[in-house]
Image (cartoon, rainbow, N blue to C red):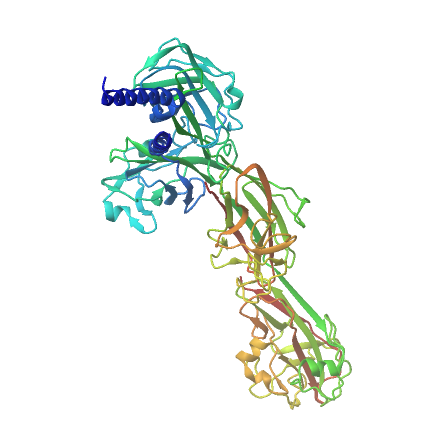
Amino acid sequence: MNFSQKILRTIVTICTLCAVLVGATIPKATLAASILSPSVGLSDVHNIATGVTYTITFTTGSTDTLKQMDFQFATTNSNTTKPASLNLTSSTLGTSTGFNGSWTIDTTDASTGLLHLVNTTGESIAASTTISAVFSGITNPEIADCDSATTTLSDTCWIRIKTFNDAGITTVDSGNVPFTITEDPSMSFQVENVVTGETHNGITSTLDSTSDSIAFGHLQIGTVEYAIQKLTIQTNAPHGYVVNAYLPTGITGANSSSDVISPFGAVNATWSTPQSWASPFGTTPNSNTGWIGANTSDGRVSGWYGQSNKFGPLSTTPHTVAYSSGADRTGTVVYVAYAIEVNGYQPSDYYTGEISYDVQAKY
Amino acid sequence: MISVKKLISAAVTISTTLALTGVGLAGQVYAAPISSASATLSNNTVAATGVTYTMQFTASSTAIKGIKFQWRTTPSAGGGKPTNLNLGVAALASATGNNGSSTDLVATTGWTIASGGAGSGDLGLSGATAYSPGATSVYTVAFSTITNNTDANDCDAITNSESCYIRITTFSDQAMTTPVDSGVVSYTVVANTTVTATVDPSLTFTIGGVTTEAALQTNDSHAGCGAAADVTATATSIPFGHMVPATYVCGQQSLAVSTNAALGYSVYQKFTSPTANVAMIGTVASTDYINTFSSTGATFAVPVAWATPTSTTANSNTGYIGIRTTNAKVQTDDPAYTTTNNYGTPYVGTGLGSAKVMDSVGPDLGTTNTYVTYKMEVNSAQPSDTYTGTINYNVVAKY
């Protein structure tokens, strides 16, 4: 062996040693790959649905003998925090594909959002193998468990997938996949009667209302009458709701369509600047000789905070009587009072009108 | 070892990059639900017809070729078309996408309404040309001529209102089989509240007496009764007392009408005597008369200056009584009543007569009195007697 041969042998030996060392110290850091095409299918995407089956599908990036697969359910794609309402403790392994029947589920860490699939003897799985792991018996997260925002009825959480060629130490492939749960929109709007003598927002009803009628009866000149309806609004609409009230065709006389009750027109009275009730001052029949106004107890409506016993005009223009900028899951009761009065110039007639409540939820 | 560290670093970097790529791929597979969604009804009255539904929502940047709207009794999991909702003649009113600039989806992409499923509660719009917003886009789609559902309690159990749902799905294909984004909104139809009120016809007529000369003159400065021995009138009596020939005496009553009669009212005065031109009759001799004012040319419509009776034939204009009014409408119609000391002829006879002492073309709160002044005078040919007469006011409201 000449010098050159010795040099060459030395280099080969060193390279071999280096290769062995590198392989021994960081074997998987250099070999680990990303899983491909990850996806999650939920048998029920609704929030906090129970007994849900998650089908987690991905394609392996590496060929290796796998002994463990981890599925970490998390609130983001970078942490390991379990979505608060997610419950994996009763998870079972369903009919899955891409791996043999020797794999079992380990729910030891389910309380932290981590499910393991374990095969202690290992299974050689080639790269580009599509694996579908099916977990059943899961309770879905709640809205806002993962997204901090509550402006939608959906929530995107994450599952971090890792495969190992040992008992969860040496990662072979890894990747993240999001899944979205949603909440069905819900909305209920109820109009109820208020009987005579009830006081709401400083106004005492002088007659009974029903859920769809207000019969003011025979008006006495110069005497104001009050009727109240109870509105209950409940919705999970993230951006809340608006309820407007208006008289689509005003209040007109049955004998003469030119006989009208005017919108409450006290000095400075607008819907956003309600005023104390005042008697109509018009002297030309049908022009401010009869007034109808409304009051809302909903202080969230612009201009109505603390406006006890004040009134704004009720007209063909929709005015907001209930408002919420966000979801109102427990429901809110709003009392809307109506006042009517005529003076001696108001023509005798039988007056009718329809109050329409326009309800809009904002999702 | 430096080379080894670089190799490790590169491997980790590649792994991280691939992991993030995986995230990106996953995000494309699972399109985000629609957001900021709402449904607005032009008329949300139960069973209203000709209603326009405007749906607005924000969806992903993915190109789409159609959008489907499904009216349902439930937000998900089954549920059929709400009872009596009629989409059969619905028309596509407008459709836009807005990714920062608005695109008319009908004009630009040629999308048309898909109403084949209207009977099941489905409406859509689609076309062969994709709308590719390239960024999240706000979609606004309006369908017109829809009939609202009734309050059949199939969406909820609340009486007089019904909150139902519209499921919204975007599709990447014209046939609308490959969904992209989806979501659900609610809409609420409500039974209107019927408001009724009755304003009854109102009419009050008030007569008052004027008790002093000063008041009489103040009430009617043109009465021409100054310095007269004016009498104290009440609502039901005008006691002229003992008349002195060639000396007039005045009595005055106030009249007020309050009514909401839209066309106003009229008040007619008359003496109830059965004899023409006779206002008052003697109690001793029924042929003793005080006549109605008959100075030359005088009628009620033509008041003339007061003058002492000049007749020398007893009971034939040897004594008479005149009348004038302060009513604004009457004075407008007959300005002669604004002339001081002009008097007209009271009416005697049947019917309403001619002596309309109050008139109005509209309602009146009755806050302004009309003053009717009676002026009486006799000459020396008038027989001695106690004369009485009855004045009647007839109020006619015109509704």
Q: Which of B256 and B245 is in front in this view?
A: B256
- Residue extending furthest toward the front: A2
Q: Look at the image and tell me in which quarter the N terminus of chain B lies.
A: top left
Q: Residue at x 54, y 52 (%)?
A: A350
Q: Which residue is drawn at 32% across and 52% down?
A: B101
Residue A144: horizontal and vertical position, in percent?
50, 34
Residue B383 vertical position relative to residue B144 in the rendered view, above or below = below
Image mark count: 0
Q: Which of A71 and B258 is in front in this view?
A: A71
- Residue extending furthest toward the left: B128
Residue A150 vertical position relative to residue B338 in the rendered view, above or below = above
Q: Residue at x 74, y 87 (%)?
A: B228
Residue A248: horizontal and vertical position, in percent?
46, 51
Q: Nearer the viewer, residue A240 or B8?
A: B8
Judge whether residue A173 can be spotted in this image: no
- The answer to which quarter of the image holds residue A194 is top right
Is residue B256 shown left or right of residue A155? right
- Residue extending furthest toward the right: B242
Residue B99 vertical position relative to residue A264 in the rendered view, above or below = above
- The answer to which quarter of the image holds residue B61 is top left
Judge whether residue B141 can be spotted in this image: yes
Is residue B103 shown left or right of residue B365? left
Residue B9: horizontal and vertical position, in percent?
37, 32
Residue A12: horizontal and vertical position, in percent?
28, 21
